[in-house]
Image (cartoon, rainbow, N blue to C red):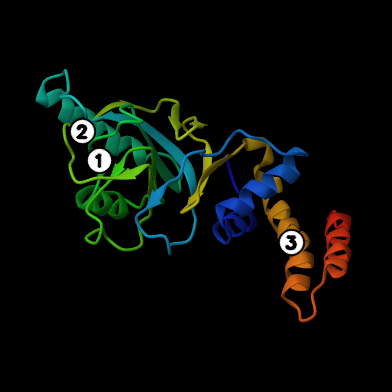
Amino acid sequence: MQLSAETWAALRGTDTPTVCNALEHCMGGRTAEGFTKVPVVSADPALPAMVGFARTAKIRASSPALRPAAEVRTMRMAYYDYVVSGPGPNIVVIEDTDWPHCVGGFWGEINVAVHKGLGLAGTLTNGVLRDLGTLDPGYQVVAGSVGPSHAFVHVTDIDVPVTILGMQVKPGDLVHADRHGAVVIPAQHVEKIGAAVALVFKKERAVIEAARAPGFTVEKLKAAWAEMESIVS
């Protein structure tokens, strides 16, 4: 999938709720699918949204790996080879198969440093985040929980469909995520999403500017709402 520079700029410059709203315009209506449905935590809530193509994997931490240590290490190295493959930018999307009872963090000081150094755009997981306060700045991890231990964490699968907090993700999907959660942008809507984001801002501005102006009343709200609904491009 190739994205124009304008589309990348539009996606990087807005938050995930706005992208969800923009997708409704692309689809012609609302939906209850395609986005995370469980509250998240983030390594740094102040960071902007991360956008990239999904490099997917699964992990487990509640029990030791069933394979010999050498095979576990080989799988881990194969995972690192995989996540940097392709033109990018890539987002690591990892399903912890212990969910909803995740006990061990794959994401902490070492893996954040490694993935940031490898040039990944960020991480989305339903699993555990740890080492808060010592993570390299500028690398976002949006996770399902915070915890202290890595337990028996190990990679079990790579390059497979995953489910993250109610959202299904396939390898190569375009993902947008921030402190609110994440959404998958379907391929058929990718090149329309930039214009849809601009439309969302334009429509919302009609009501927001009216509400923030002195002397705001219900009658002015009704007029602003009608103006918002009349904006179609």
Say which quadrant the N terminus sits in: top right
Residue 161: percent from left, percent from top: 45, 26
Q: Residue at x 23, y 28 (%)?
A: 75
Picture quarter with the C terminus: bottom right
Q: Is residue 9 placed above or below 68 in the rendered structure?
A: below
Q: Nearer the viewer, residue 30 or 141?
A: 30
Labels 1 and 2: the sequence-earlier one: 1
Does dot 2 land on a helix, a strand or a loop? loop
In the image, residue 65 above or below residue 28: above
Q: Residue beneath label 3, please?
A: 204
Does the CB distance between marks 1 and 2 fall below 8 Å?
A: yes
Task: Name the residue carrying label 2.
Answer: 153
Distance from label 1 to label 2 (Cα)?
6 Å
As measured in the structure, the alpha-carbon distance from the residue carrying label 3 to the one carrying label 2 is 44 Å
Circle nearer the N terminus (3, 2): 2
Please tell me whether mark 3 sits on a helix, a strand or a loop. Answer: helix
Residue 169 percent location from the top left of the image? 49, 32
Task: Kindly give the residue lying farthest to the front in the view shown.
Answer: 218
Q: Position of residue 163 (x, y in %)?
A: 45, 29
Q: Residues within 10 Å of mark 1 (few under 14, many from 20)?
A: many
* Amino acid carrying mark 2 in the image: Val
Amino acid type at circle 1 is Phe
The amino acid pointed to by label 3 is Glu
Residue wearing tag 1: 106
At label 3, counting other C-alpha atoms closer than 10 Å, the crowd grade (few under 14, some 14-19, many 20 or more) is: some
Task: Judge the density around disc 2: few (<14), some (14-19), many (≥20) Cα neighbours within 10 Å.
Answer: many
